[in-house]
Amino acid sequence: MTTRRPAPPQPFRWALSSHGGTAPARLGTLTDGTGAPRLWHLPELVACTGKVLARSRAADLCFVGRSLDSVYDLLTGALEGGTWPGALTRLPVSVRFTAPFTAAQRRRFREHLAAAGLEPYALARRKRALAVVDAVHRGTTFELIHRELAGWIEESREPWPVIRRKLRYVGVTVRGRTSPHHWRWQQSPESAAWVRMLPAGHVVNVSLPRDVWCWFGNDQPKLHGSFPAPHWFDADAGEPWHHSQLPEALAESLALVAAGRTREVRDALIRTVAREPGFADREVRALVGALR
């Protein structure tokens, strides 16, 4: 696997699992005053997570922003101590409503991309595919990431025909009608142009009920704040963010990591993956073996 570059200052996030070789953080009293979280969304979250694994074809996963932190937490528990050779990374930036980058912001954004394994040099030489995963409404974040990445690839003269086979996008959307005539974000003029640059099946969707999608995307307490471009150079960007909802956010994240460790959740993930067409792929079947 290609080595990723060190990350620039990013929002601090406590390690809650030993997945990836990092010892879980000692949280002390940070969750004091909270009761056991009510994981009302767990069945839908588990189904969504299994579909992300299968539809990405067991690629390495890079989670954008904070919206799908719960998928990340669940997987770091489910894959803890397993034999899966893949990686779970985060690109904890917010670019949905970003004005055009300044030169300094573009350089910093590329540092964030490189830390997540999305540097053109690394993409061209990696053995495993990498899937960028995010909650999607109209696809503006994916469009910006791909546009910036394409410009960087062109500048670096790395081989696009090689990179396009390694790069995937998984959008988690609000569940709608399954009709082929139902509008999907990939059909917007902004998205359709870059989606066509990738092989068929490399841009896929997984849906959630609206209330669950809105919880993860809009309402769920998070461990750290949003991280848009104007804050990328803040002196305290990498410091822990202690806020009123932190105990609640930490308690839910810890509960999801613990749920991922359970046989019940891992079996549910396996059943979901096994029902997907991607289960025919050797790498997907190997992932199922790591979940057992």
Image: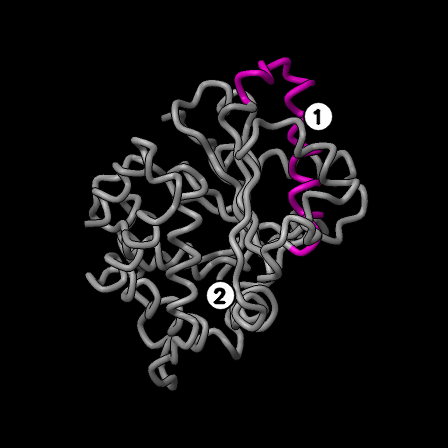
Prevalent SS, magenta region: helix
* Nearer-the-camera pick, 275 or 251: 275
- The secondary element bearing badge 2 is classed as loop
Q: Amino acid at mark 2?
A: Leu
Look at 34% across and 37% down and name the residue there: 86
Q: Label 2, label 1: how many angstroms apart (C-alpha)?
A: 32 Å
Where does residue 163 sit, x and y in percent of width and height? 54, 22
In depth, the one of 57 and 1 nearer the eye is: 57
| In the foreground, 233 or 267 | 267
Q: Are marks 2 and 1 in contact (CB under 8 Å)?
A: no
Residue 113: name its quadrant. Answer: top right
Residue annotated with mark 2: 223
Residue 42, numbered label: none
- The boundaries of the magenta stretch are 137-163
Report which residue position mark 1 lands on. 151
Residue 196 x/y as whole percent: 67, 30
Residue 239 in the image: above or below residue 232: below
Left or right relative to 137: residue 240: left
Q: Residues within 10 Å of mark 1 (few under 14, many from 20)?
A: few
Please tell me which residue lies in front, 53 or 15.
53
Q: Residue at x 57, y 38 (%)?
A: 203
Q: What is the x, y in percent for residue 184?
A: 67, 50
* Mark 2 vs mark 1: in front: 1
Q: Amino acid at mark 1?
A: Gly
Could you tell me which residue is drawn at 48 percent across and 47 percent down?
90
Residue 72 higher or lower than 120, as above or below: below
Q: Residue at x 64, y 17 (%)?
A: 156
Q: Would you place residue 10 above or below residue 28 in this image? A: above
Above-or-below relation of 198 to 206: above
